[in-house]
Image (cartoon, rainbow, N blue to C red):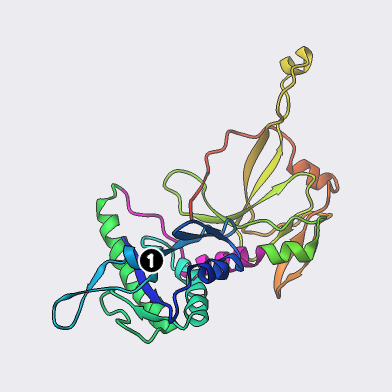
Amino acid sequence: MSYDLLLFPKTYDAEAIRNHFASRKHYEIGEGQVFYSNDDTDVYFLFDLVEAEDAEDAESEDGEAAPRPPHVAFNLNYNRPHVFALEAEPEVTAFEQAFDCAIEDPQIDGMGEGPYAREAFLSGWTKGNQIGVRAISQQMPEPPLTADPAQIEEVWAWNLGREELQRQAGDNLFVPKVVWVQPSTGAAPVRCITWTFGVPTLIPEMLITHIVLVRQERPSLLKMLSRQTGEAKTEVKLLNVETGIRLRGIERGEVDGKAALFTPLTGPLEVQALFSGAWPKPTFQVLPT
């Protein structure tokens, strides 16, 4: 199930259309399809380039089939968080304005033959998505995992701006992606980032409740005695930080007006102790957006 929108450029020029998408971030240009995929937000959708010979016939007002002109078909899957539509909409608007498009919106209570409007797009996708979620939920043995929409949007906004924050921070500070994690089977999803020992990391304190600590795996005594070598492995540990992080050596500051922490390279004994000791086998799992 998906949201579909047909865009009819005033002048259809396949090369100009591909150049438009190639000039924008996160697009892969195929022969007849343009795929958007953002690794930071996990949002994806596609545009199909439909040439005249490939276009399906549309039913005219007199009930007879009439050939559709060449067009671009936008497609966004349902059963997704609402931020998928928030990220897709500016891309649809940019294309619609760049090529002076007429539209055809076949969704129930959709825009019909236009005009195109941002709020109508978001409203139409939301209605269809709600129907899709209900339909899929009825087929699932367990109810789907859910989270506060405001929190989902906050996480998405951070991840959407993560690349620019990393550029501003430079190479000496890691700006992590915020992910959703299920601490254990049946538990509610929580917001989380990774902090690797020895890697100075920016922690958005007010945005997360948990941190995944990452360290290099401690070699066993047998491996040390036998001098076995191999690819370095890592160990992980989920840390609840809802009460706040109060460790000496961590600097406090702000990023975009929100509280943030700046971890040291290795830090004082408190930080080293945080990454020390025996770690149990992890029971958490990272959830797909």
Q: Residue at x 58, y 33 (%)?
A: 281
Q: Is residue 265 magenta?
A: no
State the predominant SS element of the stretch in magenta: helix
Q: Amino acid at mark 1?
A: Glu
User: Residue 176: x and y, percent?
Assistant: 67, 56
User: Residue 184: x and y, percent?
Assistant: 48, 44
44 relative to 213 in the view: left or right:
left
Q: Residue at x 41, y 61 (%)?
A: 80
Q: Secondary structure at mark 1?
A: loop
Look at the image and tell me in which quarter the N terminus lies: bottom left
Q: Is residue 270 visible?
A: yes
Examine the rendered structure and indicate whether residue 266 appears above or below residue 116. above
Examine the rendered structure and indicate whether residue 210 appears above or below residue 132. above
User: In the depicted view, which residue is nearer to us: 135 or 62?
Assistant: 62
- The residue to which callout 1 is attached is 51
Q: Residue at x 72, y 65 (%)?
A: 165
Q: Is residue 129 visible?
A: no
10 relative to 113 in the view: left or right:
right
Q: Is residue 156 magenta?
A: yes
Q: Which residues are magenta?
A: 142-162
